[in-house]
Image (spheres, grey):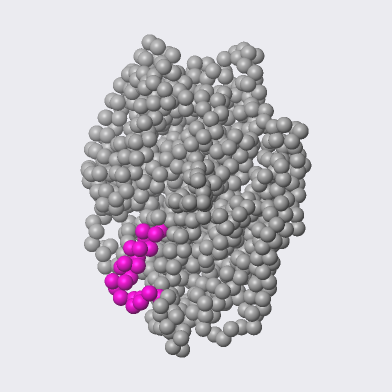
Amino acid sequence: MADLAFDPKAVEQLSPPLVTGQPSLHDVTEAVSIHTEIETHRNWYIALAISGSVTLLLGSMLAYLIATGIGVWGNNNPVGWGWDITNFVFWIGIGHAGTLISAILFLFRQKWRTSINRFAEAMTLFAVACAGIYPLVHVGRPWRAYWLFPIPNADLAMWQNFRSPLLWDVFAVSTYATVSALFWYVGLIPDIAIIRDRAKTQLRHTIYGIASLGWRGSATHWKNYEKAYMILAGLSTPLVLSVHTIVSFDFAVSIIPGWHTTIFPPYFVAGAIFSGFAMVITLMVIARWVFKVEHLVTMTHLENMNKVILATGTIVGYAYATEFFIAWYSGNEYERFTFINRAMGPYAWAYWSMVSCNVISPQFFWFKKLRTNIPFMFVLSIFVNIGMWFERFVIIATSLHRDFLPSSWGYFRPTIVDILTFFGTFGLFITLFVFFTRFLPIIAVSEVKGMMIQTEHEKHYLPATTTGSTEPVKAH
Amino acid sequence: MSKHHHHDVPKDSYEIPTSTWEKGRNIIVAVFILGWVAALAGYSLDHKQFFPSYLVAFFFGAGIAIGAALFTMIQHLTGSAWSVPLRRLMENIMMSMPILALLFLPVAFGLHELYEWSHPGIMKTDALLAKKEAYLNPTAFYIRAVVYFVIWSFWAWRLSSWSRAQDTSKDLNLTFKSERISAPGMLLFFLSASLASVDWVMSLQPHWYSTIFGVYCLAGGMWAFFAILTFTLLRFRANGILANSVTVEHYHDMGKWMFALTVFWAYIAFSQYMLIWYANLPEETSFFMVRRSGTWETVSGILLFGHFAATFLFLLARASKRNLNVLRFVTVWILCMHYIDVYWLVMPNFSKAGVAPHWMDAACFVAVMSTLALGFWWRLKSAPIVAVGDPRLEKGLEFQNV
């Protein structure tokens, strides 16, 4: 191979740079830490005021609901699950990208994950927090929510129903939240230590010192850290699949046409990853610009995420098509009716919104021009999120609203409380983000630096170019 | 990973010594003749037994080829380096596609023996089947099969021939072209292979349906593909072929893939079983009723404990994925389990009373697999057995699990 020299542009395309502008390792530390160290910006207070107000709206809606009863929502008979479960599944789905990026892409040695995993994991935790609200209040008496756990209790002369997937949800979601939080925190430790070491005040040094759990960066620390990280990645991987699998069981174990179909578990998981990646794009496009980290979260990262969106969106399309085909192929008239009703019944508007946003819109990402166009991907990622919300709504509402008996057919209309509660969860989600971006490094500094060094080592395996080698990474 | 290591490693020749190749050819040809003589004798003795036995063997081979194609395309799409030293062998397995098109002929020929829905007049007496006639009819079945094989053979040929052209031209554009064609290829393979599973296996029990069935078949096929690839490489290694290029690091990664697919298959199988069991609808449980009665229940148990649990334990530890003796055993184990899986999908439709192994099962298996092996073996001679022109080859050779 050495006798041939290649066009450097083509060779670069073989392994596109994941950090641009050739910053030194110290520059990276600086770029990522600075936003936790500067004086609080006025815009931060404005952002907090807005998102905090919306969170207060969520709080007041929930207080109103708990004081009055579930009847303030639009749930009716036969649509016993409405926006509450739709929103639960919507948020829990968004919470899938973080762990996929951190765990599965880590096991697949996808180096580009390093710049976005911290951010995506934080998003996961905040989305799970939003999701958890819905089943909690949907039980009707949230102060009795601990009955969901199999703990001995004197005031309840019964035991949990282990045959119910709703109970499995309790375990699946709480396990997921716990392990994701642990994974996120373990990854944060070396980076918190960086901020501690850079601290200018004693108070700051103490707080970040406690949070970094005595990290000293010795070889032993790193060895244990990498082992822990690998184990957590291994544990998180089945969890990425299990949570949405169990969520799909909530529907699929029933015998309701449109809910009961065997492809639900992998289809829900693909849809969750799809929506999660779209949300990462929505937020990352803004964050990389606000925090000036465009050289760390490069176009390569965004393009890769858009490719994942295209792939998972197409898998979701495959599932829709399979469902439709098998509903027809089954010859079962209830199955056939449900799917025709979805596409042409009273909820056709929701069904076609779902198909356009989830299946058609990601197909634009076949074109490199479009998947590397920031305004375009931003708009498209929002479309995907709208589509994935509609997907859950379509599944829930269309299957329930027309019962086996035409006499019990109905229609679901959200109330203002439904709408404001859902709007409020966005407030909570953004508020948590606003705090996160103020106090913690939004990019995994030590991982990015490790990746930069590794990439430098691997360069000499690439074919020789006409211009010779590029400059090595500068040390401190 | 460090620079000074990679000059010390002795280079492999990237071709099979003529004597070894001829020895291999002689064995395969002998097995091929033996297999086809036995299979054809079986056909003339008892064609009712022949077709189901043949279908099992055919579906086993087709699953592996599809698995090879899917994985090759994934490697192009992700720009993977570790797998480059193995990719030529994957391509050679994937190039079974045109041969499989020929091997499909007996299935097409045995349509009426295999598929209840193809019986003339049944659509008049069976109201449920009548609703499916637009899909389940011989003409549509044949047309679809042609479409599948055209798609599969075209993509396999395109990727394989570009890879071979790159051996001499070292043209980087071929890498990018392969990457570009792989994305629509994945989509088309996924769709066509899912429908092929419905056509060839699910429709054996034409009243039954399951939306996850295509994914189930794809998962099993890909699993067996890794086993056969790893097994072949280990045999090569025993004969000193690619012994320095494909290191324990590569075997470790293949072990990881087999482990991952063990779990993925179990996940899909569990999803299908659990949802059908839980809902307990007669039109769906019919599939598992047969497979949970009599001796078929034992086979189902073998799948649960052998296909999943045992393989999971065999491959869980890092040390076992890096132990080539363990891997050699596991690859054979996986191939056996995958055969049982395919057998379990097909055969209960023909012997509801219980498992009835027949010598023709073995004869057809040997006939089909030796035919594919023959194609594979000839392709080893027509080009280097490693993609020597791939720009990521050196990185792939030096790859280490850290």
**In the image, which residues are magenta?**
A212-233
Q: In this view, does B120 lie above or below B386?
A: above
**Place of residue A10 in the rendered image (x, y in percent of width and height, measured from the top left):** 49, 63
Residue B150 included in the magenta stretch of the image: no
Q: In this view, does A342 lie above or below A111?
A: above
Marks counted in the figure total 0
**Place of residue B372 in the rendered image (x, y in percent of width and height, measured from the top left):** 38, 32
Chief SS of the magenta region: helix
Question: Foreground: A328 or A376?
Answer: A328
Locate the N terminus of chain B and report the quarter of the image it occupies.
bottom left
**Place of residue B176 in the rendered image (x, y in percent of width and height, measured from the top left):** 50, 55
**Place of residue A303 in the rendered image (x, y in percent of width and height, measured from the top left):** 56, 61
Question: Foreground: A127 or B383?
Answer: A127
Task: Specify whether residue A474 is in view.
Answer: no
The residue that appears at 37% across and 66% down in the rendered structure is A458
- Say left or right for A311 vs A105: right
Q: Is residue B400 above or below residue B20?
A: below
- Say left or right for B156 vs A309: left
Locate the C terminus of chain B and report the quarter of the image it occupies.
bottom left
Question: Foreground: B265 or B189?
Answer: B265
